[in-house]
């Protein structure tokens, strides 16, 4: 028989435990799985996007989280391995991730999309590139993108090339060999021809290539008026000096796919005689104006990040999109309800990007716009030319 | 073919030759095929660029510091392969070098997070047959050629070299003749480490300091095999042929297929002439 004293003690303990359990339950975080190349050949690009994403979520958590719950980011280093990406996404989903964000090289995307479609967990692909399966009229269920769809990125490049060289006849696109890169170059070549370039070619190279001297020789021999580079980070620094060394004196148009203004400036200084442009969906530090620009600058400064790059902005906006969807998600929020919230997204870029981020049930990418920048040698700065290309999510 | 492309080929060949000579040197001494030398070179180049850039050291001082670290790693690998691994055979030694390469890359990734950094040894241009060529490229070529020739002279023209060749022929016989085999093996590892360091720094200066710089390890091993694996001269010829093949494919065919060249060359040589271009194995008649 239980004595009155023991019963009272147990009642006190249970009474104390119930609020504690309730609090623990209330504070249970929303788990976001994040796939990134943190140690492979593309880490220079993707880790910075993660930094931007973390900065945003740190701000959300510091303000008390969403519906009183913090947002936890479970990061998995998948390098550029499609199999590892899919299995890591599955592992994250089985451990309670409500969505998968980030992702690595374009070749890793489809395996993750397919694996998460089976589990009905939404995927939000980050900056720099997304595949066109998110475009209207029938986007892949549960997959969204806040970066740049490779077809659109390429098409915009063709038009931008004409801006940089109104009289140019020859156009070339060079990119490392990845599905996204090849598609982007194909569209750039087609758009350049449509813009009046009489010849346009694409030059692909292996993803691990770092010695660009012979490739630069090849390009210098064909001597295009405008050379589009879709390199991400790390390659520009090596390629620009090599192509200058090979005697090329045309114009380079660098697609901002993770390169960063800091690398562009350093590479440009090592490539005298070449006129260098870049174009980007997201702004870098000092380029834009708006509340999100200020908030990101402040958060980056506090985190000791020396310069805000475009892919910090992309990561930050991805954080804003997910936080917004979690806020609107019908409670108790689960992956299916989060997907429903994501499919009705409209958030302002706050100066980080010109167009708002808009997702609808039939369009998981929305309108986007791209600004043309020029490297000013005298000031050692990347400055806006003022030219903007708007793109709808409808492929031409 | 213009002068600039020719110099580019020769610069790559000189880097491959230094690395391939290092591979041959170790293989001749203990029949271990080394796979970690390119990674060692990448480590050295990251150290050098960090010391000369962030720490403000001079290029020669940062080079010597990077070389010292690479040599220390080489001593460790020597102990690992020649002392701990020897009872298990040459194959285990080879596998150990692969493991060391993996560990080095992991370490580099942790410390430098895969950053790509430029490292120029010499600024400006030099006129070569009427064409301005990067002085940096010529300096890299010079350094790699100098290092390779120096090692060839040590092996072929010194008492130490005779000891190396004796050990290569038969370690037990060399020991009976009073040669300190362990000391000779240590020197072999140190020389190969030094060559790997110079090749790694050379390639980093030609392209950039990057983790991907380790891909030259495959080319160097193929060049060594192409040359017969035991012939130092063959390694140089193999390096020139391989660099020529790779760059011709990039410029005149398609850059995507350049990485297939070493594999194709390896396959072809194994089918047509398994003993390599030199067509001989090392034999020492008298010490």
Image (cartoon, rainbow, N blue to C red):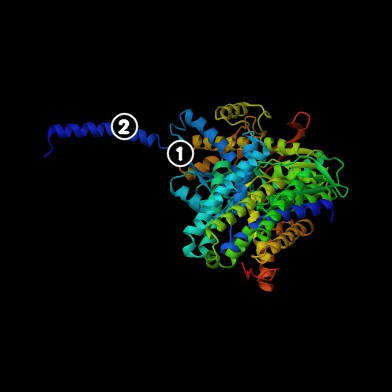
**Left or right of B52 in this view: A100:** left
Under circle 2, the secondary element is helix
Q: Residue furthest bottom?
A: B272
| Residue nearest the observer in this picture, A263 or A278 | A263
| Residue nearest the observer in this picture, B37 or B30 | B30
Residue A30: numbered disc: 1
Name above or below for residue A179 compared with residue A321: below
For the N terminus of chain A, give its image quadrant: top left
Whether residue B32 is visible here, answered yes or no, is: no
**First of labels 1, 2 by sequence position:** 2
* Position of residue A280 measured from the top left corner of the image (x, y, whole percent): 69, 38
Q: Residue at x 54, y 46 (%)?
A: B107
Q: CA distance from mark 1 to mark 2?
A: 20 Å
Q: Which residue is mark 2?
A: A19
Q: Residue furthest front?
A: B178
* Position of residue B204 measured from the top left corner of the image (x, y, whole percent): 68, 47
**Left or right of A172 in this view: B42:** left
Q: Residue at x 75, y 57 (%)?
A: B247
The chain that hosts pointer 1 is: A
Under circle 1, the secondary element is strand
* Position of residue B49 measured from the top left corner of the image (x, y, whole percent): 64, 40
Q: How many marks?
A: 2
Mark 1 residue crowding within 10 angstroms, few (<14) / some (14–19) / many (20+): many
Whether residue B279 is visible here, answered yes or no, is: yes
């Amino acid at each position: 028989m239980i004595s009155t004293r023991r019963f009272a003690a147990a009642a006190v303990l249970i009474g104390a435990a119930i609020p504690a359990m309730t609090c623990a339950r209330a504070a249970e975080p929303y788990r976001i799985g994040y796939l990134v190349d943190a140690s492979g050949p593309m880490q220079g690009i993707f880790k910075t996007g993660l930094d931007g994403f973390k900065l945003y979520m740190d701000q959300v958590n510091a303000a008390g989280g969403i519906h009183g719950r913090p947002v936890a980011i479970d990061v998995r280093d998948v390098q550029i391995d499609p199999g590892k990406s899919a299995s890591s996404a599955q592992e994250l989903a089985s451990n309670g991730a409500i969505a998968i964000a980030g992702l690595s090289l374009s070749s890793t995307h489809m395996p993750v999309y397919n694996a998460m479609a089976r589990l009905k967990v939404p995927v939000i692909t980050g900056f720099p590139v997304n595949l066109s399966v998110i475009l209207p009229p029938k986007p892949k269920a549960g997959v969204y993108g806040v970066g740049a769809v490779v077809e659109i990125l390429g098409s915009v490049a063709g038009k931008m090339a004409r801006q940089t060289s109104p009289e140019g006849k020859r156009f070339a696109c060079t990119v490392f060999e990845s599905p996204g890169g090849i598609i982007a170059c194909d569209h750039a070549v087609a758009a350049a021809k449509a813009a009046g370039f009489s010849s346009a070619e694409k030059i692909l190279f292996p993803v691990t290539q770092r010695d660009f001297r012979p490739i630069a020789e090849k390009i210098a021999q064909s001597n295009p008026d405008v050379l589009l580079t879709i390199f991400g980070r790390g390659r520009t620094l090596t390629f620009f000096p090599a192509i200058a060394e090979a005697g090329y004196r045309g114009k380079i148009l660098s697609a901002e796919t993770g390169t960063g203004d800091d690398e562009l400036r350093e590479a440009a200084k090592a490539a005298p005689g070449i006129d260098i442009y870049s174009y980007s969906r997201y702004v870098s530090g000092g380029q834009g104006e708006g509340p999100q620009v200020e908030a990101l600058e402040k958060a980056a400064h506090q985190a000791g990040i020396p310069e805000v790059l475009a892919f910090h902005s992309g990561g930050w906006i991805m954080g804003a999109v997910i936080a917004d969807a979690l806020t609107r998600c019908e409670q108790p929020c689960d992956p299916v309800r989060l997907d429903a919230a994501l499919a009705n997204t409209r958030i302002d870029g706050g100066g980080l990007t010109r167009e708002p981020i808009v997702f609808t049930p039939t369009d998981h990418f929305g309108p986007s716009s791209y600004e043309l920048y020029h490297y000013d040698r005298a000031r050692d700065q990347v400055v806006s030319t003022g030219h903007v290309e708007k793109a709808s999510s409808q492929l031409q | 073919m213009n002068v600039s492309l020719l110099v580019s080929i020769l610069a790559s060949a000189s880097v491959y030759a230094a690395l391939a000579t290092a591979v041959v040197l170790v293989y001749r001494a203990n029949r271990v095929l080394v796979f970690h030398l390119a990674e060692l070179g990448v480590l050295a180049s990251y150290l050098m660029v960090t010391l000369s850039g962030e720490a403000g050291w001079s290029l020669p001082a940062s080079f010597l510091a990077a070389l010292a670290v690479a040599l220390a790693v080489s001593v460790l690998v020597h102990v690992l392969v020649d002392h701990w691994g020897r009872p298990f055979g040459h194959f285990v030694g080879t596998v150990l070098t692969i493991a060391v390469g993996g560990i080095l890359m992991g370490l580099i990734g942790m410390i430098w997070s895969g950053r790509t950094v430029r490292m120029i040894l010499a600024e400006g241009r030099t006129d070569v047959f009427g064409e301005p060529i990067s002085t940096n490229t010529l300096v890299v070529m010079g350094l790699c050629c100098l290092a390779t020739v120096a090692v060839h002279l040590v092996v072929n023209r010194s008492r130490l070299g005779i000891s190396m060749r004796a050990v290569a022929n038969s370690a037990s016989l060399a020991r009976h003749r009073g040669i300190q085999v362990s000391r000779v093996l240590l020197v072999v590892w140190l020389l190969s480490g030094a060559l790997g360091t110079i090749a790694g720094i050379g390639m980093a200066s030609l392209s950039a300091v990057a983790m991907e710089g380790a891909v030259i390890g495959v080319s160097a091993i193929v060049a060594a095999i192409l040359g017969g694996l035991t012939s130092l001269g063959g390694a140089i010829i193999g390096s020139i042929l391989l660099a020529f093949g790779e760059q011709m494919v990039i410029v005149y065919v398609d850059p995507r297929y350049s990485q297939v060249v070493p594999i194709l060359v390896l396959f072809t040589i194994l089918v047509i002439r398994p003993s390599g271009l030199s067509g001989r194995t090392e034999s020492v008649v008298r010490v």
